[in-house]
């Protein structure tokens, strides 16, 4: 019977080893599952904090955006009153209202300066949001694409700001001063000719002509075939051979003296279009943040951030192409 006892002992050992093995497997799996749960809990907590932070950023940007919309819409309505598909008719309408005082330029300049500050505030808030967004995006498979999109949209807002601030607003201010200066000079120098005006106002004209931010507009005073070369010279500060620059200065001075309101009207129409572009860029940025927030809130959402952006831009949601807000 001894051999039976040995078999029984062997069976007991094998059973014991099986039980121990199963227990160890269960313990290892339990610890792994617990670790996953802890990580999931940490990720969920981090996700919740990120979503909350994004919502706060969206709230701040929404308030900034609303200010931009209200201010910009007021200026646009003034400029766009009597808008016509025929750009020349529209420009003439704006020029007449400038001349008779129905479109006060000083008020528009003041409003544009306020809009510039509001876009600057939006831009700074957008810049700050990077430190909230980028860490949160690292958990998403499309994170690199979103970061790239963020930087592109952010850069566009900066370009619109620079165009409005350093371009249109500054040009309107300088051109108005030149036009007013020439008009005032002529009240006491009725017989002043072109040469006298050039000598008297050449510094103011040069300030406009040599500014790279105004080069596209100043080039319109030159023949079509010479415009690209003029723009290149101004941007590269290549003033060798001053014929083009002298020609541009005469064009600006002559225009300011003979059709100042028409020139101001032209720039205002450009400005109205750029205000719409600024508003749209800010709205695009907020839609991107809303899409990121939606993606982070729903782990089971099958749509990527770019897909969510495309959906939210549509007419059923934020209607980027047709609605102001």
Image (tube, grey):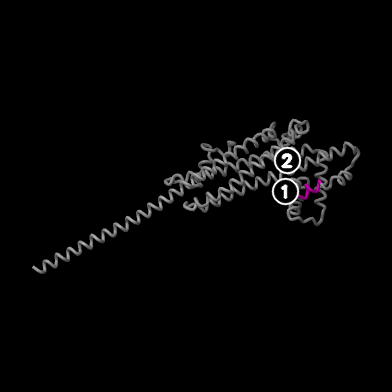
* Viewer-proximal residue among 169 and 264: 169
Which label belongs to residue 310?
Answer: none
Counting from the top left corner in percent of width and height, residue 131 is at 54, 51
Give the class, few, some or many, for how many residues have Cα within 10 Å of label 1's Cα (few <14, many ≥20): many
Residue most extreme to the right: 191
Asked which secondary structure carries label 2, the reply is helix
Asked which secondary structure carries label 1, the reply is helix
Q: Is residue 269 above or below residue 13?
A: above
Q: Residue at x 72, y 42 (%)?
A: 169
Counting from the top left corner in percent of width and height, residue 156 is at 62, 47
Tell me the quarter of the image containing the C terminus.
top right
Real-space Cα separation, disc 1 to disc 2, in angstroms: 13 Å
Q: Which quadrant holds residue 32?
A: bottom left
Give the class, few, some or many, for how many residues have Cα within 10 Å of label 2's Cα (few <14, many ≥20): some
In the rendered structure, the answer to whether residue 65 lies left or right of residue 98 reads left
Q: Which residue is mark 2?
A: 267
In the rendered structure, the answer to whether residue 125 lies left or right of residue 297 reads right
Q: Is residue 261 above or below residue 195?
A: above
Tell me the quarter of the image containing the N terminus.
bottom left
| Sequence order check, earlier mark of 1 and 2 | 1
Counting from the top left corner in percent of width and height, residue 160 is at 65, 45
* Viewer-proximal residue among 221 and 30: 30
Task: State which region is magenta.
Answer: 204-214
The reply to whether dot 1 and dot 2 touch (C-beta < 8 Å) is: no
Q: Which residue is mark 1?
A: 213
* Viewer-proximal residue among 111 and 163: 111
């Amino acid at each position: 019977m001894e051999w039976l006892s040995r078999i029984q002992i062997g069976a007991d050992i094998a059973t014991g080893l099986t039980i121990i093995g199963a227990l160890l497997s269960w313990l290892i799996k339990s610890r792994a599952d617990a670790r996953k749960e802890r990580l999931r809990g940490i990720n969920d907590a981090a996700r919740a904090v990120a979503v909350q932070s994004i919502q706060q950023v969206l709230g701040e940007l929404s308030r900034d955006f609303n200010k931009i919309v209200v201010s910009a819409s007021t200026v646009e309505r003034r400029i766009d009153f009597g808008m016509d598909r025929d750009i020349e008719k529209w420009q003439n309408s704006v020029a007449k209202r400038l001349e008779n005082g129905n479109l006060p330029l000083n008020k528009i300049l003041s409003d544009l300066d306020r809009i510039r500050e509001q876009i600057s505030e939006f831009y700074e808030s957008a810049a700050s949001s990077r430190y909230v967004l980028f860490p949160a995006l690292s958990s998403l498979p499309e994170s690199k694409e979103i970061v790239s999109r963020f930087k592109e949209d952010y850069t566009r807002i900066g370009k619109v700001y620079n165009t409005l601030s350093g371009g249109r607003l500054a040009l309107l201010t300088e051109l108005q001063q030149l036009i007013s200066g020439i008009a005032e000079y002529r009240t006491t120098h009725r017989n002043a000719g072109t040469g006298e005006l050039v000598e008297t106002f050449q510094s103011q004209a040069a300030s406009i002509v040599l500014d790279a931010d105004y080069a596209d507009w100043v080039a319109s005073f030159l023949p079509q075939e010479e415009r690209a070369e003029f723009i290149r010279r101004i941007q590269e500060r290549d003033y060798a051979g001053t014929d083009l620059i002298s020609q541009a200065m005469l064009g600006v001075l002559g225009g300011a003296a003979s059709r100042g309101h028409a020139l101001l009207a032209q720039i205002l129409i450009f400005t109205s279009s750029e205000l719409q572009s600024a508003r749209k860029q800010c709205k695009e940025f907020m839609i991107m943040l809303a899409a990121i927030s939606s993606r982070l809130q729903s782990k089971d959402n099958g749509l990527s951030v770019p897909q969510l952006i495309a959906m939210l831009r549509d007419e059923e949601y934020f209607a980027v192409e047709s609605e102001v807000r």
